[in-house]
């Protein structure tokens, strides 16, 4: 049988490597049919890409026949019309990309949110100090391992708290 998942608080240091959504979040999201992600900062390209990488992780871990519903609650970009339009384009691309993997993404905007979390229908609540924006800048160079593999990226300092709620 599988070892029980860690419950509690974890701190990660600035410039640390070896961290990925697969190890950090994957085991807690596995088997979930409904996942709610609250992160006010899914606004810019790299933030939408981080969300897509989390969705890739969920898609690769689920059975092809299973459907997963993700509800994303984020805030509208406050940098003017052009920035809002770009944000909507990124989110539409995430939604379309996720659908290929059998994942439905429903996006809603709430400008009052501040805390960042992931809640599953399997009883987990994960508090994300920085949301999904944990990685330092990646160049996008096709020959840099960090471009495609999160574990080779350096992270910003952040914390995660895993809470087991009753199902």
Image: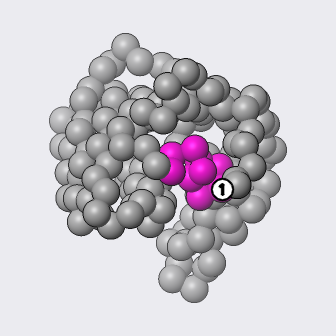
- At horizontal 75% and vertical 62% (from top left) the residue drawn is 18
Question: Is residue 157 visible to the viewer in this orientation of the structure?
Answer: no
The outermost residue toward the bottom is 143
Q: Is residue 96 left or right of residue 42?
A: left
Residue 129 to residue 57: above or below = above
> x, y percentage for residue 37?
42, 35
The quarter of the image holding the N terminus is bottom right
- At horizontal 24% and vertical 66% (from top left) the residue drawn is 100
Mark 1: give few (<14), some (14-19) or many (20+) Cα within 10 Å: few
Q: Secondary structure at mark 1?
A: helix
> x, y percentage for residue 22?
59, 58
Residue matched to label 1: 23
Number of labels in the image equals 1
Residue 36 to residue 15: above or below = above
Residue 89 to residue 80: above or below = below
Scheme by which the image is coloured: one colour
Asked if the stretch drawn in magenta spans residue 29, the answer is yes
> x, y percentage for residue 117?
51, 29
Question: Is residue 16 visible to the viewer in this orientation of the structure?
Answer: yes
- The magenta-colored residue range is 22-30
Q: Between residues 109 and 20, which one lies in front from this camera angle?
A: 20
Q: Is residue 18 left or right of residue 36?
A: right
- At horizontal 28% and vertical 63% (from top left) the residue drawn is 65
- At horizontal 37% and vertical 14% (from top left) the residue drawn is 112
Residue 35 to residue 154: above or below = above
The outermost residue toward the front is 1
Asked if the stretch drawn in magenta spans residue 105, the answer is no
Main SS type for the magenta part? helix
Image-quadrant location for residue 13? top right
């Amino acid at each position: 049988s599988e070892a029980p998942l860690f419950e509690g608080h974890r701190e990660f240091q600035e410039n640390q490597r070896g961290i990925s959504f697969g190890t950090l979040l994957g085991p807690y999201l596995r088997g979930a049919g409904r996942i709610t992600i609250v992160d006010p900062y899914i606004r810019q390209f790299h933030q939408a890409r981080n969300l897509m990488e989390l969705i890739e992780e969920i898609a690769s871990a689920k059975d092809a026949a299973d459907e997963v519903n993700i509800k994303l609650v984020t805030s509208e970009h406050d940098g003017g019309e052009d920035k809002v339009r770009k944000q909507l384009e990124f989110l539409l691309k995430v939604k379309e990309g996720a659908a290929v993997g059998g994942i439905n993404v429903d996006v809603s905007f709430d400008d009052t949110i501040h805390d960042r979390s992931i809640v599953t229908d399997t009883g987990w609540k994960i508090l994300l100090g920085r949301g999904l924006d944990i990685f330092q800048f990646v160049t996008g160079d096709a020959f840099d391992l960090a471009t495609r593999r999160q574990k080779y990226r350096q992270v910003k300092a952040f914390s995660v708290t895993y809470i087991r709620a009753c199902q």
